[in-house]
Image (spheres, grey):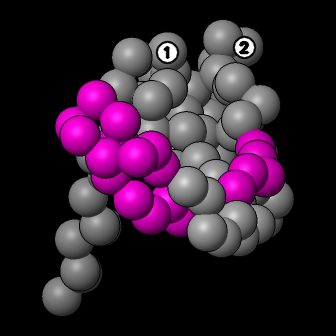
């Protein structure tokens, strides 16, 4: 499963985690200084959901949580079949 949103195309991004020391000048210090920069990844919050496509097809896709919150997808209706009655 790739880490890419089916709707928005969101994917993992690279960035840095910056560690600083010192006190800000506006708080009475002599300024903040960067002491370490570490590489990191920003991974989107992806969820696997069953949706109904505009064509009417129902399938499982991976979408970002923001897509679900915004209501950009139509979730598939619940199945409501019942098992057949046992013949005596």
Range drawn in magenta: 11-32
Task: Please tell me how crowded label 2 is: few (under 14), some (14-19), or many (20+) other residues with Cα within 10 Å.
Answer: few
Depth order, front residue of 61/59: 61
Side (left or right) of 75 relative to 80: right
Number of numbered callouts drawn: 2
Residue lying at 59% horizontally and 48% vertically, measured from the top left: 44
Which residue does the numbered mark 1 point to in the structure image?
A: 72
Residue 61 visible in rendering: no
Quarter of the picture holding the N terminus:
bottom right
Asked if the magenta segment contains residue 44, the reply would be no
Q: Which residue is mark 2?
A: 55
Q: Counting residues from the N terminus, which is met first, the one under dot 1 or under dot 2?
A: 2
Image location of residue 71, percent across then percent down: 39, 17
Point out which mark residue 40 bears: none
Residue occupying image coordinates x 53% and y 64%: 19
Percent across and percent down for residue 25 are: 35, 36
> Between residues 82 and 7, which one lies in front from this camera angle?
7
Task: Give the mark toward the camera: 1 or 2.
Answer: 1
């Amino acid at each position: 499963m790739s880490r890419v949103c089916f709707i928005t195309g969101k994917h993992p991004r690279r960035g840095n985690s910056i560690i600083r020391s010192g006190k800000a000048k506006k708080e009475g210090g002599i300024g903040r200084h960067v002491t370490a920069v570490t590489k990191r990844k920003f991974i989107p919050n992806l969820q696997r959901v069953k949706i109904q496509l505009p064509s009417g097809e129902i399938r499982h896709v991976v979408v970002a949580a923001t897509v679900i919150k915004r209501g950009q997808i139509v979730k598939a209706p619940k199945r409501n079949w019942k098992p057949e009655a046992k013949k005596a």
